[in-house]
Amino acid sequence: MTDLLDGAELRTFLPTQDFELSKRFYSALGFEQVADGEVAIFNTVGRCGIILQRYYQKDWAENLMLSLLMHDLDAWWARTERADLAGAFGVQPPKAPKMQPWGLRVGFVHDPCGVLWHMIQRPQAAG
């Protein structure tokens, strides 16, 4: 059955309180903006991305968590530190990557409306 999804792409809709601020935030994180209009579409490397929408509901935003596996978490963290997300965007200070009890190395970032990202070092065996 998985061959039916071969080549499929996944993009998750995310809320924004301040659409322009959120676009700048995701650009600073390294997402590539590929469309802008009523929604803004951002890609990551690979077949996934996000769609920022001009919609916000506090309970939804503050209970939404996403994870992004990457090959070089340390390089991503260095970029994140240089971006000074807390100072530039008024978000909670990101938490540096560290090994978690569940066996993955993870850094944590909140976006401008409270969405929590788990930035994860891709395990070697996962390729």
Image: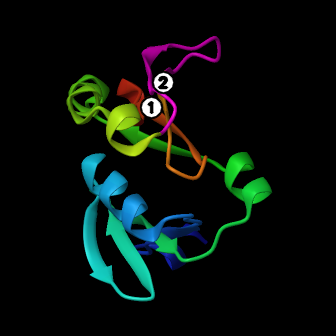
In screen coordinates, is 63 left or right of 45?
right
Secondary structure mostly seen in magenta is loop
- Residue type beneath disc 1: Ile
Contact between marks 1 and 2 (CB within 8 A): the answer is: yes
**Quadrant where the C terminus is found in the figure:** top left
**Can you identify the residue that label 1 sits on?**
120
- Mark identifier at residue 24: none
**Residue beneath the point at 52% across and 21% down:** 104
The span picked out in magenta is 91-105
Residue 13 higher or lower than 120, as above or below: below
Label 2 element class: strand
In screen coordinates, is 111 left or right of 43?
right
Q: Magenta segment: does it hold 1?
A: no
Q: Magenta segment: does it hold 99?
A: yes
- Mark identifier at residue 106: 2
Which is more N-terminal, label 2 or label 1?
2
Label 1 element class: strand
Q: Position of residue 76 (x, y in %)?
A: 26, 33
Residue 35 higher or lower than 88, as above or below: below
Does the image show residue 127? no
Q: Position of residue 19 (x, y in %)?
A: 45, 69
**Residue beneath the point at 28% across and 34% down:** 71
